[in-house]
């Protein structure tokens, strides 16, 4: 069984900018990475990083999900969608999946439940992220060696996430 990462975001560019290196490193480590987006008119940048892209509405409307990811990531702006908010809060309450958030406005419900984490990304991830950004129309955007998240650990990742 492969580890699974699910990312929920408004569009591909948002994911590539803030989590593209980490996404790439997870796919090359054998993780199954699925990105759920509202706007999927240009998903090529996510495909460059190795992600499978699905429509967020179709995915959230499904009555039952066969498998649950070990890790979930999203920008804090997605908390505006009550379905996403409820799912993420449930993950944090039950510690059923590692939750990684990016963005400036941390929802009040997450305060004290997540820790600021700088994730190092490989050189290969930086190169592929730069290529994905160029494909998305942002060729001059700098790609740094880390990506910043606020992370709430699951029961199985609690030691490793908070050790850094």
Image (cartoon, rainbow, N blue to C red):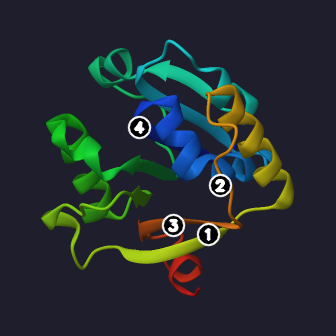
- Image position of 8 (left or right of 93): right
Q: Are marks 2 and 4 in contact (CB under 8 Å)?
A: no
Q: Are marks 1 and 2 in contact (CB under 8 Å)?
A: yes
Residue lying at 57% horizontally and 87% vertically, measured from the top left = 163
Q: Quadrant of residue 150?
A: bottom left
Q: Are marks 4 and 3 in contact (CB under 8 Å)?
A: no
- Per the image, label 4 sits on a secondary structure element best described as strand
Q: CA distance from mark 3 to mark 1?
A: 6 Å
**Nearer the camera: disc 2 or disc 3:** 3
Residue on which the image places disc 4 = 8
The numbered disc on residue 22 is 2
Q: Residue furthest bottom?
A: 163
Quadrant location of the C terminus in the rendered image: bottom right
- Looking at marks 2 and 3 on the same chain, the residue that comes earlier in the sequence is marked by 2
Residue lying at 40% horizontally and 36% vertically, measured from the top left = 9
Residue on which the image places disc 3 = 148
The numbered disc on residue 119 is 1
Q: Where residue 149 sits in the image (x, y, percent)?
A: 46, 65
- Image position of 87 (left or right of 74): left
């Amino acid at each position: 069984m492969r580890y699974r990462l699910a990312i929920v975001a408004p569009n591909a560019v948002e994911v590539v900018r803030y989590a593209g290196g980490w996404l790439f490193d997870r796919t090359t480590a054998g993780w199954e990475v699925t990105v759920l987006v509202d706007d999927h008119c240009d998903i090529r940048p996510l495909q460059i990083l190795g992600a499978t892209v699905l429509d967020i509405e179709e995915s959230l409307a499904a009555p039952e999900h066969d498998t649950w990811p070990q890790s979930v990531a999203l920008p804090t702006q997605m908390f505006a969608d009550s379905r996403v908010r409820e799912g993420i809060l449930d993950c944090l309450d039950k510690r059923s999946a590692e939750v990684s958030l990016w963005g400036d406005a941390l929802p009040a419900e997450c305060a004290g439940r997540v820790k600021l984490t700088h994730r190092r990304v490989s050189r290969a991830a930086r190169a592929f992220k730069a290529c994905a950004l160029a494909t998305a129309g942002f060729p001059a955007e700098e790609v740094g060696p880390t990506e910043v998240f606020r992370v709430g650990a699951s029961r199985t990742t609690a030691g490793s996430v908070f050790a850094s």
